[in-house]
Image (tube, grey):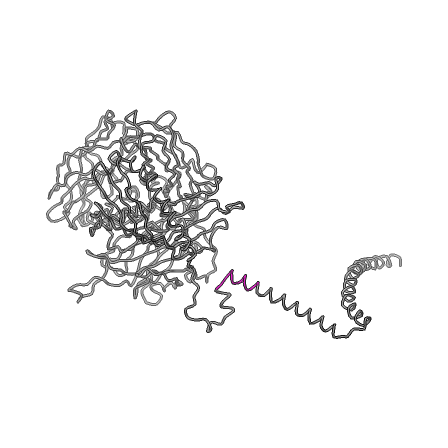
Amino acid sequence: MRDAEGPGLVADAARAEPAGAALSVDVVGLLAQLARSFALLLPVYALGYLGLSFSWVLLALALLAWCRRSRGLKATRLCRALALLEDEERAVRLGVRACDLPAWVHFPDTERAEWLNKTVKHMWPFICQFIEKLFRETIEPAVRGANTHLSTFSFTRVDVGQQPLRINGVKVYTENVDKRQIILDLQISFVGNCEIDLEIKRYFCRAGVQSIQIHGTMRVILEPLIGDMPLVGALSIFFLRKPLLEINWTGLTNLLDIPGLNGLSDTIILDIISNYLVLPNRITVPLVSEVQIAQLRFPIPKGVLRIHFIEAQDLQGKDTYLKGLVKGKSDPYGVIRVGNQIFQSKVIKENLSPKWHEVYEALVYEHPGQELEIELFDEDPDKDDFLGSLMIDLAEVEKERLLDEWFALDEVPRGKLHLKLEWLTLTPHAARLDQVLTDIRADKDQANDGLSSSLLILYLDSARNLPSGKKMDSSPSPLVQMSVGHKAQESKIRYKTNEPVWEENFTFFIHNPKCQDLEVEVRDEQHQCCLGNLTIPLSRLLSSDDMTMNQRFQLSNSGPNSSLKMKVALRILHLEKQERSPDHQHSAQVKRPSVSKGGRKVSVRSQASEPPGAGDSSPAPPAPVLGGGVKPSVEDRAQPAEASPQGPRDLGRSASSLHGSTSGSPSHIFIKEPTPSIASDISLPIATQELRQRLRQLENGTTLGQSPLGQIQLTIRHSSQRNKLVVVVHACRNLIAFSEDGSDPYVRMYLLPDKRRSGRRKTHVSKKTLNPVFDQSFEFSVSLPDVQRRMLDVAVKNSGGFLSKDKGLLGKVLVALASEELAKGWTQWYDLTEDGTRPHVMT
């Protein structure tokens, strides 16, 4: 019995303990309830004890209800005010019925800022004083020091005018931005009756500007936000794209108002503005000394947009015959813009459903407010006809990461465009490189062409203790040339100093960083000589901390203490794949603002059109698989894109080019060749493709000889005494006939990677011959160690005459100069090929 009672007693004790604990809690609650009841009953008891009327109780209850109601109304007003501040449109629509809102009530994302215009108007006289001081104390001495012929240059009058700068609208971004920055877009407009006169007394030359008009969208970034005054670390200002500019000249510069020259002069000035104020360039004003100015002036891009420009369908036929009686087809091509970067596709002749299958890569620095703009045109001899446009918000592309669909073209009754867009994220993790190289199928031994696996960002800071160059008593005018493979860029010139400061940023798309090197050379522009060079294997960055090197690099072939300060960073281009449900419809989420010809932007939702084949019997053509299927041959990849003559609008020659131009009608574009794609065989310039087609026509089932395009005889040697590379073009033989009358050949040469106009050499034109004799000598100013790292690009072209269509490539050859016999020289015959590769040497 005791054993049986034992567990029962234990159970009772266990139940008794929680009961005691619950009792202690209930006591506290009971005491609180008693205290509240006493507080309520005490006034009633006091009224009865004092003999007062019960109406006092009713009066107290009414007063209590009124206080509670007043407090509730105050809280409601406060909540409404906070809701109005957070989302005005939603608060108004919840408070007022839609039928009660007038038709003129709307909620734009761009707001008027008249208070800001009044402030600028009040400050305008002082702003004019600052501008005049800037012209006289900064610009004037810089122009005088640039050249001895400009030593008497001066501004005789600087009057900006009485009309102040006007800000038509302000847009503040609150989504997809960093919490430590504020982004504003200012729609500025300046129409000034200014008078800026200049004079060069030495040549009795006077010129000036009478009025200026400039319109554009300027972005202002306040970052980083800090917890101490002035709360903002720095201020950055730049244009997202080139502004519209119109200038009225006076004096000798009246010649620039001649039709044909006025557009050219405005374009040149816009290019100068772009070098300082158009993205990725910017002006940064530090407000706190501890802020990293280099990082703020040239930040790492937000991402890279890879554009697969695939095909179009159901385009309009713009070509007509017999004065419009017979409808024809179109010769479509596309113009692609991402900020200041512009690409042009090849032209597809006589086709309303063209297939381009081209790929371009563009840098994106500021995706809020930046769009992908595409326009299709029909190529014509006079003015190209418009075939449709498309604009896609890059912020939505970043969210989706990958888009592959058909889009309906705007501003035209019909037409569809097939695009594949990839948003590539920049990551500093070298472990992802192998996977990226596998995805793009990078060839280990051919590292200069193809899709990019990484991005190289270079910040050129300054140099120290540079040598004097040829003359010991004169200061050099240094510039820096940088190249990775066949892609080259150069810095601005700093005149007459051996300790230049550049503070410039450069970017290179890299195919395979394991096999490529960064070549840097400091040159004296005045004396055309090398001041020093260095080579940085990109594989060193893969093992560096954060894949970044920030140091002073010792220059080779220079002074004992000559150094170059740079910050070099490598970032892997990674496509983040998102997990999506099978019924995910990303096309409905892509905002596609369209721009009408009047310039007004309307934001609409993208309704991706049904792909061809969904509604008809013809199947849709499959999207190309880049890097797979048709693999580019060695000849296709080894040859860099040939530079074409540049017109007033400078299109980038590769996906890494950042040189853009003003937006406008392509009827003003003067372009010989489109921007080459970076995908497979289409990466070749159009001239090379046409030459291959002509070669196939010549073959026509027969076997051509060892040199189907002919040969060229060259003498190449380096003069160490004169520090020059000497190339003698002797003759060509067995060239192909470009027309029935033969060919009008001439020879064009570049010393790669320099493809500037000043680095081009040309022979005279030989008329109507397939075996021309030139016997012309050309020189390149380059040292022997430097020339052994270069390559000579020789092209034989057909001139064709003025306004002739018979212009094109007859053959190319690439001559490697890394030979010990270069100092002695040699004379040889070289086989011409369509792209310059596979040179067969005959002595």
Location of residue 458 by image quarter: top left
Is 692 placed above or below 726 here?
A: below
**In this orientation, which residue lies closer to the viewer: 540 or 497?**
497
Residue 211: give x, y in percent of width and height. Answer: 28, 51
**In this orientation, which residue lies closer to the viewer: 248 or 243?**
248
Is 556 placed above or below 603 here?
A: above
Q: Is residue 257 left or right of residue 740?
A: right
Where the N terminus falls, by quadrant? bottom right
Is 607 placed above or below 300 here?
A: below
Question: Is residue 354 visible in this depiction of the protein?
Answer: yes
Is 485 placed above or below 220 here?
A: above
Q: Is residue 81 left or right of residue 683?
A: right
- 82 part of magenta stretch: yes
Q: Residue at x 42, y 40 (%)?
A: 569
**Count of number-bearing discs:** 0
Residue 567: give x, y in percent of width and height. Answer: 42, 37
For the record, the magenta segment spans 78-88
Location of residue 617 by image quarter: bottom left
Where the C terminus falls, by quadrant? top left
Look at the magenta stretch and give its main secondary structure.
helix
Question: Is residue 357 visible in this depiction of the protein?
Answer: no
